[in-house]
Image (spheres, rainbow, N blue to C red):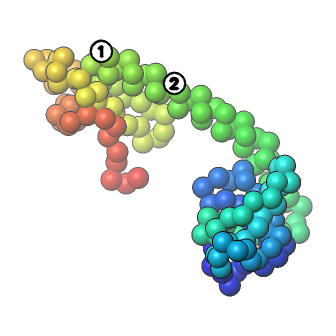
Amino acid sequence: MQKNEVQQGLKVRISYDFTMRGIIIATEHRDGPNYVVVEWDDDHRVEVKNITNLVAIAESDGSLEKSFEELVDTIGEQIKAHIKAAQQAILLATDLADTHGIPFFTEVSEIGQPYIPYSFRDKWADLDPNYVSDLTEIEASELARNGGWSTSQIC
């Protein structure tokens, strides 16, 4: 957000956290020209924030937008909970892979990604890469990488 966009009563959110929304209640603060005072919607807590960490929320008087915002608040939280559980499950899977040196391919997105544990080469260097590929659905050429998650150039 730029200083010329800042005005009292502007609805904002934190740029890295969609759940933290509030209203600017003061456009100046002793910390400097880029600081404003925000009252947060969830608990009415007042906090000084740098405007570079804030994003203006578009105003809407339409009921369609209001319905969508309510769903983001409720269903969005349920989605985040499922994603957090999935992240924890993936961490458990990578820990197992690292412990035993077993690469795996995950299809948690439409693109899918292989994970090659760093311990794979140490534990299984003598295995034929084509054999490993047949068992794990990971391309043999991927097994020569150093390890970790493989990311696509299209992402």
Disc 1 crowd, CA 10 A, few/some/many (<14, 14-19, 20+): some
Q: Residue at x 44, y 32 (%)?
A: 107
Residue 81 locus on image (x, y percent): 67, 33
Residue 140 locus on image (x, y percent): 19, 31
Q: Give the answer, above or below, for where 14 lies relative to 109.
A: below
Q: Is residue 126 left or right of residue 16?
A: left
Q: Give the answer, above or below, for where 116 lies relative to 79.
A: above
Residue lying furthest front: 30
Q: Which residue is mark 1?
A: 100
Q: How far is mark 2 from mark 1, CA to CA?
A: 17 Å
Residue 22 locus on image (x, y percent): 79, 60
> Is residue 59 visible to us here?
no
Q: Which quadrant holds residue 83?
A: top right
Residue lying furthest bottom: 4
Q: Which residue is mark 2?
A: 89
Check disc 2 and give the amino acid type: Ala
Q: Is residue 103 left or right of residue 48?
A: left
Residue 26 locus on image (x, y percent): 80, 73
Disc 2 crowd, CA 10 A, few/some/many (<14, 14-19, 20+): few
Pointer 2 or 1: first along the chain: 2
What count of labels does the image hold?
2
User: In what quadrant of the picture does the N terminus appear?
Assistant: bottom right
